[in-house]
Amino acid sequence: MDISNQTASPIIELKNVYKYYDDTAVLKNVSFTVNRGETKIILGGSGSGKSTILKIIVGLEKVDEGEVWVGGENITSYTEPPLMKIRKQIGMVFQEGALFDSLSVGDNVGYRLYEQGTLNDDELLKIIKQTLGFVDMEDALEKMPSELSGGMRRRTAIARALVGTPGIMLYDEPTAGLDPITAGTIIELIIKLRDVEQVSSIFVTHRLNDAYRLARERLIQKDGRLTYQSESPDTNQINTRFIMLKSGEIIFEGTDDSLKQSQDSYIQKFFS
Ligand code: ADP
Ligand code: MG
């Protein structure tokens, strides 16, 4: 059963998008949707266009052909002022999770809100603490980025993106460079956002194990507690689907199982 398509209500949609750098097409006829509450995992080798897709959705890059829709609005030709409004709905975790090294964890997390200047210090601190609590980092408020482990830096980057409770999260290789255990804790956090907060998201990665965990586990309420649970392969209820990019083209879209069964030679090589 496919629950993602029954009451399809796209929160992100790319329609026949082409993007060129100089004369080279880095995205070719890319079309896909992310429905409300859904997670799309974008797999693809280095240089296949994954980060470019995310930059297009936040309006940091413009498309050369095609359309980009976010939250029901056609943002394809939006200028900066309307794009700022769109960006408020989106939390983006950039590749490498770049933090401001001269700012404390708390200031990194509160940065977006400071800039907006609409809240007083007490209100800001409250939101920063809540957000750090969500990523299990409440004790790190005053720490500097240089004092953090790799996993804590990624958590901070996620917390920074979460401030303002965006309905959409875009993760650009959030587990790259982390050991498997630490990567697992980041995946759990992303599952929590999907299943508890119903955040719609795009998760870009080239790490298959992390992608599969995200597609096969969910967080459920059991005896009044939240527990991570693997789903049985025959149900496919988890609202997470895969896209595979190859040199700027989508060559696969579907569930984890159908990806695994694909006979495409490029996909098979990706798995080996
Ligand atoms: P991925 O994130 O999948 O590794 P990217 O989306 O970053 O791939 O890049 C896709 C292609 O576009 C690559 O060949 C890259 O070299 C090229 N590219 C990305 N950004 C630029 C840019 N600003 N100028 C020129 N080429 C770029
Ligand atoms: Mg990239």
Image (cartoon, grey):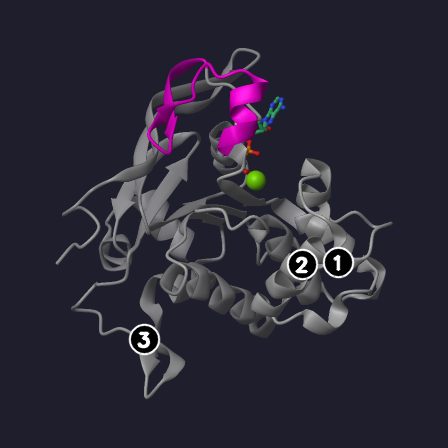
Q: Which residue is mark 3?
A: 230
Left or right of 237? Residue 38 is: right
Which of the 4 image quarters holds residue 218? bottom left
Which sits in the foreground, 109 or 101? 109
| Labels 3, 2: front one | 2
Q: Which residue is mark 2?
A: 128
Mark 2 surroundings within 10 Å by alpha-carbon count, few (fewer than 14), some (14 through 19), many (20 or more):
many
| Labels 1, 3: front one | 1
The amino acid type, in three-letter code, at marker 1 is Gly
Image point 41% across, 53% down: which residue? 199
The amino acid type, in three-letter code, at marker 3 is Ser
Label 3 to label 2: alpha-carbon separation: 32 Å
| Circle number at residue 267 | none
Residue range highlighted in magenta: 64-86
Which sits in the foreground, 265 or 225? 225
Asked whether disc 1 touches disc 3, contact meaning CB atoms under 8 Å apart, the reply is no
Reading the chain from its start, which is encountered first: label 3 or label 2? 2
Residue 52 at least partly seen? no
Residue 61 pos. (x, y %) = 55, 23
Q: Which residue is mark 1?
A: 106
Label 1 to label 3: alpha-carbon separation: 34 Å
